[in-house]
Amino acid sequence: MEGTYKGNDKLIVGLVLGIITYWLFAQALLNTVPAIQQDLGIDVSTIGIGISLTALFSGIFVVVAGGFVDRFGAVRLTVIGLILSIAGSLLLILATNTLLFITARVIQGFSAACVMPATLSIVKAYYDGAARQRALSFWAIGSWGGTGICSLAGGAIATSLGWRWIFVFSIAVAILSLLLLKGTPETKTVASSKKFDTIGLIPFVLAMLSLNLVITRGGSFGWFSKITLSLLLLFVVSAIFFFRNGFKKGDNSFIDFSIFKNRAYSGATLSNFLLNMVAGSLIIINTYLQMARGFTSFQSGLLSIGYLVCILVTIRIGEKLIRKIGARKPMMIGPLVTSIGVLLMAFTFLDDMPYTIAVIIGFILFGIGLGLYATPSTDTAVANSPADKAGVATGIYKMASTLGGSIGIAVCASVFGALSVSHNPSLAAMVGLGVCVILCILSMLSVFFTTPKDVKNS
């Protein structure tokens, strides 16, 4: 039935709500760190681990889920992901200690791993041409704009009702998404006799987990301690084994490296990874505003209204720009504008009112930059992915997003946490945000050097 079914607005809304469930349990926590710390009695670095674990596990298993999309269907995987989202949110509502908090975050990581590539594959299957670009722009609103929507909503919910209520709303949104997706025919599946590359997955998981632990706990363990050095060794050995296995097995490997032969796809994926690392700036700015400037989570969320409005508006502008000037220029302009926004937030030496104004303008530029980048990048990745490996290719693209976000959050939380102890929070925030500015510039340069001028789009 896939050949005759055409996607409609009801399906788009269902897909967007499915993606927003991810941001409700991922992004909203960036704005509620002090409240969670006080309630559960765990330190900031441990909360940082919990926050980054969702993105980490999503990034690790999103390619696996992408392969399952090709084999078992995108609609089925979306439903499974939403059910896992409900389970993880319910566990967080009931969490009373670190173990339950961490476990719930891991479950939510598996949820996002299913939802992200599956929803993107549904767009590829049921929309074409201008209709696909429109659908992708709304998908990008959920994927990128969801950060602002859920940051503001999460702050308001946490301040008025308590942080656990965020996940009550997440469950309600997931159920609504399931209802809207009901009746959507299953996407085309690809029969395969290939065995899953477990040998490739294991070293990839070990490499990512060891790297995450080094970044988040290296300071606590001691940077030159036996534990840290052992984790670094595990990361290097696992990474080497993973790449050797991948090139040896070719398209039978856990990650099919042949997909990266397309320069446009590679450029979109690399820049996507780097720009998503800038998500770490949000945990810095929200924590800094609440810890050092006396803002509530709701007040710090209010400062990001400009981000929310601008990203929602400019995502649609990015869709139009593809048709007029192509995808390459918006993919370069976006990170540049974002870097200026983050730079303004790094002016922590300013007094309260001037700094508040700088943060407001910074969030506006942040939103404009991400909005201009989102649809051109996503459309480039989708249009340049092989038709018979669409699930895997979109899975890798979203892996770049989630791993970028996970590593960025881990790095920024560690930098801010370490410098806050030995120096004042203002300096800690300035340095951490400065790192994010550099990441924006690297994202722009990666597009310049890798993405062809005649890039193919939908």
Image (cartoon, rainbow, N blue to C red):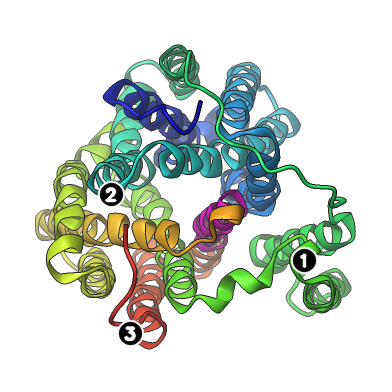
Mark 2 neighbour density, 10 Å: few (under 14) some (14–19) many (20 or more): few
- Which structural element holds mark 2? helix
Tell me which residue sits at (50%, 61%) in the image: 385
Is residue 389 in the magenta section?
A: no
| Residue 367 placement, left or right of 431 | left
| First along the sequence among labels 1 and 3 | 1
In this rendering, does residue 187 appear at all?
yes
**Distance of label 3 from label 2 (alpha carbons):** 26 Å
State the predominant SS element of the stretch in magenta.
Answer: helix
Label drawn at residue 207: 1
**Residue linked to disc 3:** 448
Distance from disc 2 to disc 1, alpha carbons, whole Å, reads 39 Å
Q: Where residue 72 sits in the image (x, y, percent)?
A: 69, 34
Highlighted range, magenta: 390-409
Occupied quadrant, residue 50: top right
Residue occupied by mark 2: 129
Q: Of the residues tagged 1 and 3, which is closer to the observer? A: 3
Residue 394 on the magenta span: yes
First in sequence: mark 2 vs mark 1 = 2
Q: Dividing the image into 4 quarters, which one contains the C terminus?
A: bottom left
